[in-house]
Structure formats: C-alpha cells, structure tokens
Amino acid sequence: MSRYLHAPLRFSLAIVLVLASLVASVGPAGASTAPQDPAAQYASDSLLVKFKADTPAADKANARAAVQGQLAREYSIVPGLENLRLPVGAIGVEKAIDILSHLPSVEYAEPDYIVQSLVTPNDPSYGSLWGMTNIKAPLAWDTFTGDPNFVVADIDTGIDYKHLDLAANVWTDKGWNFITNSSDPYDDNGHGTHTAGTIGAVGNNGIGVVGVNWHVKIMALKFLDSGGSGSTSNAIAALNWAVDRGVKVSNNSWGYASIFYPTALCDAVANAGTKGHIFVAAAGNSSSNNDSRPFYPAGCRADNVIAVAAINSTDGLASFSNFGLTSVDIGAPGENILSTTPGNTYGYYSGTSMATPHVAGAAALIWGKYPTWTMAEVRDRILSTARPLPALSGKVATGGTLDLAAAISGSAPEPVALHLAALSATGSAVARNKWTATVTITVKDANGALVDGAEVSGSWSGGVTGTASCTTGTNGTCQVKKTNISTKVTSVTFMVTNIAKTGAKYASSDNEVNPPSITVAQNPTASRP
C-alpha cells in the first residue's frame, strides 16, 4: 500500500501544525547531507548524525570534537544514530553538518528540524460522535470493547491524564515528557488529549464521549510543546521509548511536507517495524497529493506504516485532507470530531490528526482481540476490509475508509503464498587459485508479483559447505555468494531451503524451479528456468 514531522495535524479550533522540510543527498565522502527547504526551521544548537556500523568509539569522539558537539542522546532503535548539542554561537549547524558529512565514519548528518503550529477557528455547533457510527464501531463493540492491558503510544503534546473520561485508560506510569525529560507528560496544548480520547476515552461510564477502545492503556509521550512545536530528535526518542517497552501501536498525528527524505526519522520508523510495531500517521492537511510532494512520517518507506486521510460525515474526502494513491493507505473520520480536551472538557476538532487515532484505535482493538496475530496481519486486516468510497477511489491505496466492524470479525487472514520464481548463477574466473559463486534468486507471490522483503535461506554443497541467506529488494531479487572456493572444486550447488516474510508462507509446491537448486561452475553462466 503506501510507503512514503512534525506538528499536530489538527485543523480548526485545534491547531494545524505544519513543518517545512527535512532531507538527504550524497556528500563527497558518501555520507548524506541535508539540503534545506527555505521554509524549514531547525534547532540552532542541535543536529542528528548516524555513524556507520562498527565505528570505533574513538572515531565517534573525534567526530563530535570536530564540531564541538556534546552527545545528548543515543537511539537503540537506530544503532549508530546520535543527537549532538552544539555550543550556541559556535560552529553552527550547517557548517557542522558539512564537516561531519565528509568524515568516512559518518553515514549521514541532518538538521534537528522543528515543527510549527498554526491556529484557525472551528464551528463547535456541528457534530457528534458521527465518526464512531461511520466506522461501524457499535457493531464491533458487540464483539469486543478492548483489552485493558493493551498499550497504545500517543506521540503528541501529552495527555490530561486526570481527565475523568481518560484517567482509567491512561498507562500506569503515564508516559514521558521529552521536552523536560521528566515523567510528567501533562498536555499543555490540548491536541494530544483530543487524539487520546478518540483512541480510548472510557466507555460505558455515563459521561462524555467514548473512544474506539472502551478499555485500553494510553501511553502519553510528549514531544510537542504548548505551542505545538517539537523536534525530530525528540520524536525519534519518543518512538524509541515506546518500542523499547514493547508497545505495538503508536498514533502519530503530526508531520511535514518535503521533497527530501528524512533518513533518521524513517530509519526509526522502519526499525520499529522489525520489532512488530504499527506506526499510524496522519497524511497532512494541505489538500495536496502526497505522491508528488511526500508528507512525513506518513511517507516513510516502511511496511509498518498506515497513512491516514480524513473524510467528512457525508463520506467525502475532507476539503483539507492530503491524499495519494501510492502514498496514503486509507481514510477515516476527521472533520468535526468530538473528543476530550484538557480540564474535563470536550471539543470539536478537524484534521487528519483526528482521522489517525480512529485507525490507531482500530489496530489496538483488533490486536487486543487477536493477540497472536502479527503486525502484518493486523495491518492487512485494517486495509483489506476498508469500505469502498467513490470519493477515495484513486485517492488512497485502498480506495476506502476504515470499517471497524469488518476488520474485527472473522479469523486470521490467510498468509500470502510465496514461491521461488527463478535462479541464475555465475561462477567467476579463477584468481589466485580461488573463485566465487554468485546465485541470484527471484521470489514471487501467488499472483505472480515480485516480492520485496522476503528472506531467502539456503545451503551450499558439492565440495563446499555452509548456509547463506539474503533479503529480496523491490525487484523481487537478492543474491548469495560463496567466496574463496578452491580451484580443485570445479562446481558447487546452492539449494533454497526456505522463503520467509511476516504475514506470508513459503509455498514450495508452487516453485517454478524444481528442485529448488542450481549448480555453479567456475566460469560459465547458468540460468533456470
């Protein structure tokens, strides 16, 4: 479906947050530098740098010293990534990035971008909980109302954890404030409390509103301040904090548009996916096509992202909502949404910020009912059961909007069947009495489509031993090699033993190559079928 910060994406009475940009290109030494969008704002005393794997500690220390940088934070979610603080008025961010990008130990360096909020009015006289009816929540609640132990991270402005309609569903330790570096994530803006209410305002308690989950635990991760501003470094830290604690779903109602790819942020999002984490993100409020101008983090190229557009109460695409046939996955109610606001109050907000927690809440409800399902199975269930809408046809990948009742019914989705489509091999010429065997593997699904992200395993035989594995790219292929083969061995054989991918199964009976092996000679080129 889709794969393409930072401000709460709320329209109207609430805040619309728009960030300008972020980026990456290639510096002379192969490291990534960061071209800047003129409208972008970034911290004057902070930057992000990722060191290459196995960089010695001494080299990292020397790199920091070269820009007078102090290590502020490391991220387990992206090994090698650091947030450096620079002395105010010293070397400057742009110069520091230029220096770091030329160091052989640096993979990329980027500014620590800031998000800005914009305020516009809204009409509080219209609306009710029409969104819950639209997604068929009442039918879903006949089946399941939520797991009180399932945790959802709301990465936002914090939460009013004392709110009578939220308190019982706030995570035991509340969460974390990445601005003050404290355990008090109280919402001094209002946006986070509103998104939290849609995810999980307490149900059947006789007051206020109800969330998608009547029972759930919401972890408040505050990285946006009272004005709706936040930094990339703190956003990554918040996601890191959640994933380290085993949280499987996060709501991300913030973002920014850019022609440049935010490598550090998207590395964190993708790596969260390897831990089984679903990252639900707002598509943006600029009425624009994200296919032509990507919006992040919704546009991060990762299989764990669900990018959400907003619809109105008449099943139309909301006038402010971004869209994108390849970059936005699904729609959800986002106009005139009633939810909790700080101080035991309630308010109507509009935006893709409001649509996103409907989907994050759905992921939590589904996973709560089916705890053994994988990340891919939950994500696929949400997208595959979308209710088709004419207004979303050609606008989002599913062509539809969230249908909670359909998503929560039935059994686990049938795994996608993968098979070996082709094998080709090349034996190198002899050099210093040694040669190398290279095997190229192609994987397809049952529909004949090339498969990205499939891990292929196999074993070598015929005068050599050992196992090998590789992961297919977007062209459905990957390569394994056997090096330093003695010239006494004139040929070797590689056999595929398994193909694995989350949410899929290896259907060896569908293989187009049988047996699933190929022999490689020292010089000639072989190919099957």
Image (cartoon, grey):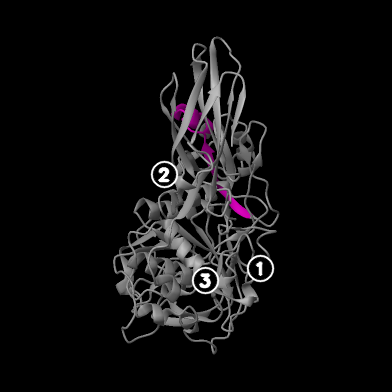
Q: Which of marks 2 and 1 is nearer the N terminus?
A: 2
Q: Horizontally, is 282 left or right of 502 in the view?
A: right
Give the magenta-colored segment's residue range.
41-63
Q: Position of residue 178 (x, y in %)?
A: 43, 56
Q: Can residue 55 be seen in this view?
A: no
> In the rendered structure, are the residues bearing label 1 and label 3 in contact, judged by CB atoms less than 8 Å apart?
no
Residue at point 39%, 67% (across, down)? 366
Q: Closest to the observer: 85 or 372?
A: 372
**Helix, strand or loop at disc 3?**
loop
In this figure, what is the number of numbered marks? 3
Q: Which of marks 3 and 2 is nearer the N terminus?
A: 2
Question: Is residue 198 located in the magenta-colored stretch of the structure?
Answer: no
Q: Give the distance between the C-alpha atoms of the residues marked 3 and 2, in whole angstroms.
A: 35 Å
Label 1 CA crowd tier, 10 Å (few <14, some 14–19, many 20+): some
The image quarter containing residue 398 is bottom right
Any mark on residue 136, and which? none
**Helix, strand or loop at disc 1?**
loop
Residue at point 39%, 77% (across, down)? 140
Q: Closest to the observer: 435 or 417?
A: 417
Residue bearing mark 1: 394
Amino acid type indicated by mark 3 = Ala
Residue at point 36%, 50% (across, down)? 244
Residue bearing mark 3: 386
Amino acid type indicated by mark 2 = Ser
Residue at point 48%, 29% (across, down)? 494
Q: Earlier in the sequence, mark 1 or mark 3?
A: 3
Residue bearing mark 2: 76
